[in-house]
Image (cartoon, grey):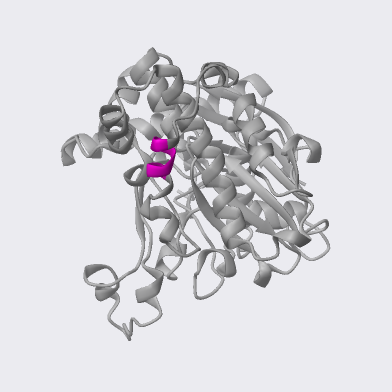
Amino acid sequence: MALVMGLNSGSSFDGIDVVLVEIVNGRDGYPARPKFIRGTSYDWPGPVAGIVLRSFENKVSLFEFCRLNYLAGAVYAESARALMRDAGIKPGELEVIGFDGQTIYQEPPVHARLHDFDDGENLVGRWLDGPYGCGLQIGEPAIVAAACETPAVTHFRTMDHALGGTGAPLMQYLDYVAFRDIGPILTLNIGGIANCQLAHPDRAKMMAFDTGPGNVMIDHVMRALFGKPYDKNGDVARSGKVDQALMQKLKEHDFFKRPVPRSAWRLDFGSSYADWILADYSHLSKADMLATMTEFAAYAITRSITDNVKTIAEIKVIMASGGGTRNSYLMERLKDYMPKGLRLTTSNEFGIPPQFKEAIKFATLAHATVNHLANNIPAASGAVKFGILGKLVQPPRLAKA
């Protein structure tokens, strides 16, 4: 049995979730479903959060960005140490700490070009002129490893990019190890960007793709129009009326034309896009605008699933997680949109708290990394082969001086 810590700050950027889980490997050598021990959430310090938000819009200098990487690492380290202290965990008792860092930028591969891209040994061409994906996460892992005296694994997406994959979403590995005994099952994570996974005992039959916006535009509208970080329980959206003209415009977004596997980021549905909508549809009431954003999130999730999961008729359960599950109105709209016969539930039913599933994901990925287990799913990401995701940094206490 391994005691592992996972941390996550996702595309919603609404805090850092930290969890402790126990992981035991199954008979096939891969982890069994992680056992959740405890978890908590910590806010980003205000001064640091302000710089991160500016970096999303490419409004920080290179020099500022360099320091921000270390600042973010310190924030992750303080969050990890806080839970270690509260749980009475000492250095050496944790196998590893897994976290991806805060995603600042994400650029998916162009899969249509990948199939025809003959790069041979021209590695430089893959990114100079070629269609390979890339991304950038911040949060220096050496600070976490040093402060917590624990091995730290981070930056899980880059190996998948190197293998021609999307690098996002990453939930499919946790879904494989947690649900391979009961699959096929659909899982849905509703963060800032929502993503869906088809978990299956046969990894070659798995899928994973972003479905479009989850909370990202809902939260932006709440901040812009109401000065609040989110719509608690969806109460404001529930009081409004969906504007059909705006819905039609949203449905025409180019994101839906991209084949899976696909990933989305703030360039698709972030603040710039939301601000354009707010300006062009300023005649709508605040409640109507929020109702329409919530309706679109439910529509985008369902459309992406029904358009791309060809075996949808054979699947009985879709299991949701993420912050969006706490928006009861969004969950109601999802139930109305979902195909009949597909039961919508949350990961609580399977012993995984919905708000902590992403942090559990990074704990599980890190456990696989330090045990040299393949922790990508090529069929889901488009990578050419299995690989070991994550970069390992060892703590000072393990140095042989």
The main secondary structure of the magenta stretch is helix
Which residue appears at 57% of the width and 64% of the height? Answer: 380
- The magenta stretch spans residue 249: yes
| Percent of width and height locating residue 192 | 47, 36
Which residue appears at 31% of the width and 38% of the height? Answer: 273
Would residue 196 appear left or right of 66 to someone viewing this image? right
Residue 40, above or below 152 = above
The number of callouts visible is: 0
Say which of 358 and 69 sits in front.
358
- The magenta stretch spans residue 109: no
Q: Residue furthest front?
A: 245
Is residue 151 visible to the viewer in this orientation of the structure? no
The picture quadrant where one finds residue 243 is: top left
Is residue 163 visible to the viewer in this orientation of the structure? yes
| Percent of width and height locating residue 68 | 28, 34
Would residue 269 appear left or right of 195 to someone viewing this image? left
The picture quadrant where one finds residue 272 is: top left
Say which of 14 and 51 sits in front.
14
Say which of 227 and 358 sits in front.
227
Residue 310, above or below 359 = below
Which residue appears at 39% of the width and 18% of the height? Answer: 285
Q: Which residues are magenta?
A: 245-250
| Percent of width and height locating residue 259 | 46, 65
